Image: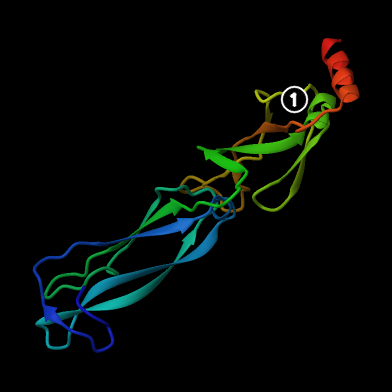
Amino acid sequence: MFGSAFGGARAPLAGAVGDVHVEVPVTLAEFYNGCVKVAVYSRQVVALDGHTAKTEECLKTLVVKPGQAAGTTLRFKGDGNQQLKRESTDLIVTLVEASVPDQKATRRGNDLIFSCQVSLQQALRAEPAELVTLDGRLLKVPVDEVVTPKTLIKIEGEGMPIPPVKGADPLEPLRKGDLYVRFEIKFPKKLSDDQRQRLQSVLAA
């Protein structure tokens, strides 16, 4: 660091300096819906005397498009470090996935995997399950079999948006991957003798 951009300490200009690299956290829901983020970073700027440098704090607004993924890099030419008698270097922003407590969805390529919690009663009765999508919709999932921890239900076209290829018609709706639902069964902590007998009779049928 070379000090503050607002009258702080300065240091002699170094030789060639590299690009500025910044990581910006993005949640899975933000990757799904698209969002605007702000990258905060520091860069070297050449002082007016042309012989010393100082550090400047900068903000860069960037657009995350629906369907982009962690690991995506965005390059902003000339927004990196300033150099004497050389072009400024670039700012390179890498998108990383932010951790969200109790998040029910994970991503696998263009597909989404949701974890849906159901009671033992719901599992045995094959009752429809409900989940909230990453864009806030309540989605009812039809179930036509007794649910087990190995049950996996596929819902086509409810996964991540797929970014359009270059030259695609901008009016065309985004295609999406698929959504897979896994089930977490909540087992009761206690059963009465009568409940245990009835459950045994059902499972033995």
| Residue sitting at the far front | 193
Q: How many marks?
A: 1
Residue at 8 percent across and 68 percent down: it is 15
Q: Is residue 28 above or below residue 177?
A: below
Residue at 18 percent across and 69 percent down: it is 87
Q: Is residue 3 above or below residue 79?
A: below
Residue at 71 percent across and 23 percent down: it is 148
Q: Position of residue 28 (x, y in %)?
A: 55, 50
Looking at the rendering, in which quadrant would you find the N terminus? bottom left
Q: Position of residue 142 (x, y in %)?
A: 79, 32
Q: Amino acid at mark 1?
A: Val
Q: Is residue 149 visible?
A: yes
Q: Position of residue 108 (x, y in %)?
A: 52, 36
Residue at 75 percent across and 35 percent down: it is 118
Crowding at mark 1 (Cα within 10 Å: few <14, some 14-19, many 20+): many
- Residue 160 left/right relative to 23: right
Residues 134 and 126: in front is 126
- Residue 162 left/right relative to 166: right
Q: Is residue 155 visible?
A: no
Residues 125 and 59: in front is 125
Image quadrant assignment for residue 121: top right
Looking at the rendering, in which quadrant would you find the C terminus? top right
Image quadrant assignment for residue 147: top right
Q: Position of residue 152 (x, y in %)?
A: 66, 26
Q: Which residue is mark 1?
A: 147
Image quadrant assignment for residue 178: top right
Which structural element holds mark 1? Answer: loop
- Residue 115 left/right relative to 189: left
Q: Is residue 95 above or below residue 46?
A: above
| Residue sitting at the far top | 205
